[in-house]
């Protein structure tokens, strides 16, 4: 094979599906906190493990988005 260019990008396995995913630019700041290869996997661990923290129904009437590392492209 030719043209296989290995870039020096870090990668780590997804905590949900176990597949390795590669560093992305949008994760540059939060790479240490990124544990899932996609938003889908992040959502999956949410329903599997425990309910999302800090969501009290009817407490504060606002669209609370508990995603600090979630930048949808
Ligand atoms: Zn995954």
Image (spheres, helix red, strand yellow):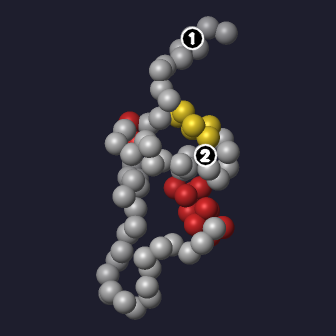
Residue 62 lies, in percent from the top left, at 32, 81
The residue sitting at the bottom extreme is: 58
Judge whether residue 26 can be spotted in this image: no
> Image check: 43 left or right of 64?
right
Marked residue nearer the N-terminal end (2 or 1): 1
* Local secondary structure at mark 1: loop
Left or right: where 1 falls relative to 23: right
Residue 36's x, y, as percent? 55, 49
Which one is closest to the eye, mark 2 or mark 1?
2
The residue identified by callout 1 is 3
Secondary structure state at the residue bearing disc 2:
loop
User: In this rendering, does residue 24 appear at all?
Assistant: yes
4 over 33 or under it: above or below: above
Residue at the spot x=38%, y=69% of the render? 65
Above or below: residue 4 compared with residue 51: above
State the residue at coordinates (40%, 67%).
66
Residue 47's x, y, as percent?
62, 70
| Image quarter of the N terminus | top right
The residue to which callout 2 is attached is 14
The residue at the point 44 percent across, 79 percent down is 55
Percent position of residue 64, x then y: 36, 74
């Amino acid at each position: 094979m030719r043209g296989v260019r290995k870039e020096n990008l870090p990668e780590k396995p997804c905590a949900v599906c176990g597949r390795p995913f590669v560093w992305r630019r949008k994760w540059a700041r939060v790479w240490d906190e990124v544990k899932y290869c996609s938003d889908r996997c992040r959502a999956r661990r949410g329903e599997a493990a425990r309910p999302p923290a800090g969501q009290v129904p009817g407490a504060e009437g606002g669209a609370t988005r508990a995603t600090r590392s979630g930048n949808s492209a």
